[in-house]
Image (tube, rainbow, N blue to C red):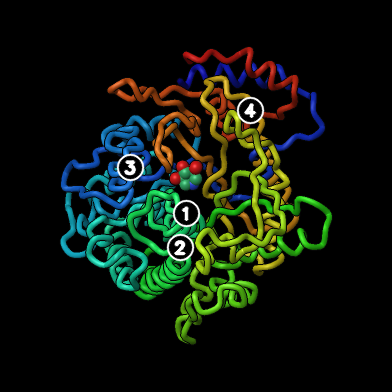
Amino acid sequence: MEQIFALFTIFLAFAFSGRCSDVFSRSDFPDGFLFGAGTSAYQWEGAAAEDGRKPSVWDTLCHSRNIGNGDIACDGYHKYKEDVKMMVDTGLDAFRFSISWSRIIPNGRGSVNQKGLQFYKNLIQELISHGIEPHVTLYHYDHPQHLEDEYGGWVNNMMIKDFTAYADVCFREFGNYVKFWTTINEANVFTIGGYNDGDTPPGRCSLPGKNCLLGNSSTETYTVGHNLLLAHASASRLYKEKYKDKQGGSIGFGLYLMGFTPSTSSKDDAIATQRAKDFYFGWFLGPLIYGDYPDTMKRTVGSRLPVFLEEESERVKGSSDFIGINQYFAASVTNIKFKPSLPRNPDFYSDMGAYVTYLGNFSVIEYAVAPWTMEAVLEYIKQSYNNPPVYILENGTPMTQQKDTHRVEYMHAYIGGVLKSIRNGSDTRGYFVWSFMDLFELIGRYDYGYGLYSVNFSDPRRKRSPRLSAHWYSDFLKGKTPFLDSQGIKELQSNFSPSS
Ligand code: IFM
């Protein structure tokens, strides 16, 4: 692979030399800026019932709805050394992965599974010894099923204590080597998907026509959001009191943010766009930065929106050293008064009063190259939330071709957008491609193809192969890609052999 990258690089340098005015390279980014790629436990590890791991709500949802599952996934549990080698070849600074709570504490609380701990210790050592920074997420859609059965999981505030105890184990066992912790991945869409719509784990809702056995879309979405914030604040406080001095790491909170834009120039759509920002961004950023929910939400959701006690508000405010952002696409917003799907049962969308449509080619499920969406999100966060440190924890587009030219254009443009935002004052400190390799997608299926590396899921060995984008990213990371214009893209493609 090394040799192929070298040849490829010489070709790029020759083909692109001196041709572009809009040039940027990784050396334009501030010192210490991290470039990486990511996966998550259930989507990558497999070994679902191995070495003492017990099911999470994600396992249960997949098996009960028969939508495919992560039982084997990429088999990262067994192939992690091979994968770390690929990360080194690619030139990643950092690898983002999540820890499976039920692998290290199978029942969610109580006894710790030594074999589970050992897996993560091995993975972290493998990364560190190869100079790759572990960027660790504690929760990515997958709390232990046992806690869901026992008391309803996140709808119950007992989760705050159990999550904090789980985080304590992680900080204690891995914290000497892990400097970046994200407590909760994309808290907003996890909550909307899992408790309003019921499509993603744990699959709770009360909307008609959905497949949910339990749930209440009017209330649980907000209760869960509240408990996530309190659990994050509690884990963050524990880290600061017990570990930060010795370990010197930082703790962040993750959100999924779209570049909202009004669908027309009408005043109503402009107001609806601000409401959408309050509901998707402010719902969590308001409490994290200012200690309370946005007024729009308080007004509309009323008594269904939990209230922070003064001491809770103080604890949540300032509890994130950084904001983790998953950013994929632009979305247009239209003002609309939704009738709740069930009379007198408002849900997240009818509360928000806005219709959000995503911009992109959905017939082939590829996201449009719209880097302004990233710039708009970063600018909004800078201006509205006191410019906190930000890590882009996920950015990418699905597409299955090995010659994934569209993804190369997409990544090039979005990375350029991040650079522009930094030059405009955003405190963005890292960028992670989603995903390092193809993996099991959130609502089932293996055929989305988010990966820089494709994975042959029909092959028991789960063979990985670099896509064009892996080559491009590698060259960029090694400071060798001078620029990318349409001619450059053509040459990049023609030099690429899918078998390389
Ligand atoms: O694969 C998912 C990931 O688990 C969470 N963020 C969005 C990705 C793409 O859908």
Q: Which of the marked residues, 3 or 1, is nearer the chain's N terminus?
A: 3
Looking at the image, the residue that sits furthest to the bottom is 310
Q: Is residue 219 left or right of residue 21?
A: left
Residue at horizontal 58 percent and vertical 28 percent from the top: 364
Task: Using the image as rendered, state which of residue 317 and residue 397 is in the foreground.
Answer: 397
Q: What residue sits right under mark 3 in the picture?
A: 65
Left or right of residue 372, residue 228 in this image: left
Secondary structure, mark 3, is helix
x%, y% of residue 174? 31, 56
The answer to whether residue 56 shows anywhere in this view is yes
Find disc 2 in the rendering and name its residue. 217
Earlier-in-chain disc, 1 versus 2: 1
Gap in angstroms between the C-alphas marked 4 and 2 = 37 Å
The kind of residue tagged 4 is: His
* Label placed on residue 406: 4
Residue 149: % across, % down: 24, 60
> Is mark 1 in CB contact (under 8 Å) with mark 2?
yes
CA gap, disc 3 and disc 4: 33 Å
Picture quarter containing residue 492? top right
Q: What residue lies at 48% left-to-right and 38% top-to-bottom?
A: 435
Q: CA distance from mark 1 to mark 2?
A: 7 Å
Instruction: Estimate the x, y position of residue 337 in percent, counting from the top left.
Output: 67, 62
Residue count near mark 1 (Cα–Cα under 10 Å), binned few <14, some 14–19, many ≥20:
many
Q: Are marks 3 and 4 in contact (CB under 8 Å)?
A: no
Badge 2 crowding class, 10 Å Cα cut-off, few under 14, some 14 to 19, many 20 or more, is many
Callout 1 amino acid: Asp
